[in-house]
Amino acid sequence: MPDQAPRDWIEVGRIVGAYGIKGWLRIHPYTTRPEAVLEYRPWRVRRKSGVIEPLTVTVSQVHGKGLIVEAAECAGRDDAEQWAGAVIEAPVSALPELPAGEYYWGELLGMAVQTVGDFALGTVHHLLETGANDVLVVRGSDRERLIPYVPAVVVRIDKDQGRIVVDWDPDF
């Protein structure tokens, strides 16, 4: 992602599997309130194969910490199972603008991470919510690192360059 323009689409959730026999989908939203993800439309889905397709929600319902949705593109349970593992994306323009210095998790995914000493650690694979603070899961060529997403560690985020600079010991 380095040296690329900012993304027009952002990950807002993922399809975790089929629900019921009529082909509904179980959705894990990346929003604090599960139903909030429905405000960010239109949706498109990036399948594991890399294929991008639209996903049109016709009916939705909060289900535990996630959602279940009926989609026009799913004809039945067998069809819905084929969507499992796909990532749901929405246009960045559909999300509320954040104050300066705040970022959506989806904006950080795929960004290169390097230390203040220019040591490349890898790229952000995903983030974890621990309760105390969020954690960047950075996958590099040598290993995976868990880096606290706190001001004392995250020195700079450059969305235009797709880079995060951290004050972190590469051996840790």
Image (tube, helix red, strand yellow):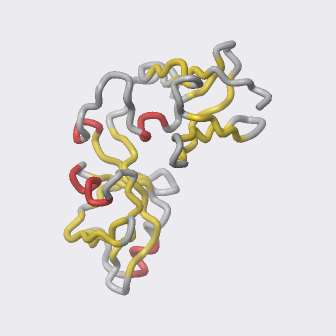
Instruction: Identify which residue is drawn at 32% across, 84% down.
Output: 22
x then y, percent, for residue 166:
60, 22
Which residue is the extreme one toward the front?
A: 132
Displayed quadrant of residue 68 = bottom left
How many numbered discs?
0
x then y, percent, for residue 39:
21, 52
Q: Is 53 rendered above or below residue 119?
A: below
Instruction: Identify which residue is drawn at 39% across, 78% down.
Output: 19
Left or right relative to 30: residue 150? right
Displayed quadrant of residue 117 = top right
x then y, percent, for residue 109:
49, 38
Left or right relative to 94: residue 135? right
Instruction: Identify which residue is drawn at 37% across, 32% down.
Output: 7
Q: Is 11 rendered above or below residue 103?
A: below
Q: Is 62 rendered above or below residue 138?
A: below
Which residue occupies the foreground of this view, 4 or 70? 70
x then y, percent, for residue 168:
68, 24
| Quadrant placement of the C terminus | top right
Which residue occupies the foreground of this view, 57 or 48? 57
